Amino acid sequence: MSSAQPPRVPLFRAAMAVVKRDLLAEWRTRIAVNALFLFAFAVLVLVGYAVGPTRLAPEDRPTVNAVLLWIVIFFSAMTGLSRVFVKEEEAGTASALRLAAPPPAILLGKYLVNILLLFAVTAFIVPLFLVLMSFEIKCPSLFVALLVLGCLGLAGASTFTAALVSKAAAKGALFAVLSIPLLLPPLIAAVSGTQVAAREEDFKAGVDFVRVLVAYDGVVTTAAFALFDAVWRE
Amino acid sequence: MRLVAEGLSRSFGTRKIIGPLSFSLENGRVLAVAGENGSGKTTLLRILAGLIRPSSGHVAFEDGGTSLAPRDASHALGWFAPDLALDGALTAAENLDFFAAVRGLAPKAGAAGRWLEDVGLDPARVDGVPLRALSTGQKQRVKLAYATLHDPWVLLLDEPGANLDEAGRAVVQRVVASQRARGIAIIASNDVRDLALADEKLALS
């Protein structure tokens, strides 16, 4: 092989190596997992204690519960998902990674790690929330579709924003400032769709919100892959 | 194959750190970069590795009719530096297996063990031990393995002998000797033992 010819690095294989390495390191340190789950648990207990199922009028439950559920998911995401890139800069491992791994594989790997973390914390939050708040869902398929697509959007935007802020001095504040406007569109769609899922049995009643989330996830993912190389290397 | 740097300079704000510098290095040669603290040795190596951009000038890795900038030649570059860090929660072998995978090297059973042996570490002694629990000298050797596991054409060594015992220094000598057969090496250091490994010297002021 000529030195000028780079080896063909299979994107998915390299991304899976990033996933394996990050999950292994996370399993041993449990920093992001602890932050995500402890925050989610604390907020769930607080919401259950302060609001509870009996203090809400039946007609208000779909609206209030949908908002509260997505607030818990959103702030859990804000708490832990920036770590995928911030930890690389803080630990000084970013340069080694920059030199060795193709940027798209790094982004895909980090995105998959955040998706897995957010799916895990959502799987923890949602059943507890439904029980604690007696939140009845009339269209479970719509609800699950919104959760999956909403989490994909949150994870995608958070991952890219984390890469943007990882070299900044005030990472935490900057991450929130950049993420919140980026995440408002999917959050509004997810909250509105969840209200519909709690009121209507027909999937079609909330299909517009599903479409918004599909479009958002597509745009965010495409933009992230298009811009990441410049963000990561500069 | 050769490395060519022309009019290379780097400033941070109004403060010029290096340059303008021009030099070239042919296959099989070892260049030592010397200079007092703050003279820009580390900055020069980071530019050559493509980790930072020069303020002016350019670097090219030429091979036949092909010329690559450092950022397009990371597959052919190995970089070792005091501020290089690997994942402290993983073992030495897990770190090396990870970097081999993302570099696209074919998975081979026992490869990490051989890379560790190449830098004088007993794989059995560091097996299961997180990198952060190893001594500074052991970590230095793992970083050397990281820099060389893909048989790079250009090996950039920033203070390679720092924190190493005599056996560790012998490992550096071996690494530089095998690099001669493969391509070029650039060593940034003020230690006479490191500088003695080089054929050419570039003094920064």
Image (cartoon, rainbow, N blue to C red):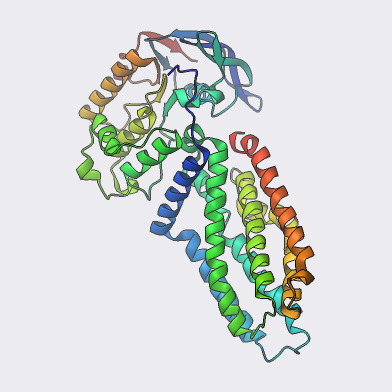
Please state the horizontal and vertical placement of residue B32, each as a whole percent of the image: 39, 15
Residue pictured at 54% horizontal, 26% vertical: B50
In the image, residue B53 sits, relative to residue A113, either above or below, namely above
The residue closer to the viewer here, B85 or A97, is A97
The residue closer to the viewer here, A72 or A31, is A72
Query: Within the image, what quadrant is residue A187 found in?
Result: bottom right
Give left or right: position of A114 versus B119: right
Residue pictured at 45% horizontal, 24% vertical: B77
Give left or right: position of B14 versus B24: right
| Residue A55 visible to the viewer | yes
Residue pictured at 43% horizontal, 16% vertical: B33
In the image, residue A149 sits, relative to residue B187, either above or below, namely below
| Residue A188 visible to the viewer | no
The residue closer to the viewer here, A98 or A20, is A20
The single residue placed furthest to the bottom in the displayed view is A54
Please state the horizontal and vertical placement of residue A105, each as a whole percent of the image: 53, 40
Please state the horizontal and vertical placement of residue A81, each as a whole percent of the image: 57, 56
Query: Within the image, what quadrant is residue A226 found in?
Result: top right
Please state the horizontal and vertical placement of residue A87, each as a whole percent of the image: 50, 49
In the image, residue B183 sits, relative to residue A158, either above or below, namely above
Query: Within the image, what quadrant is residue A209 found in?
Result: bottom right
Residue pictured at 72% horizontal, 59% vertical: A213
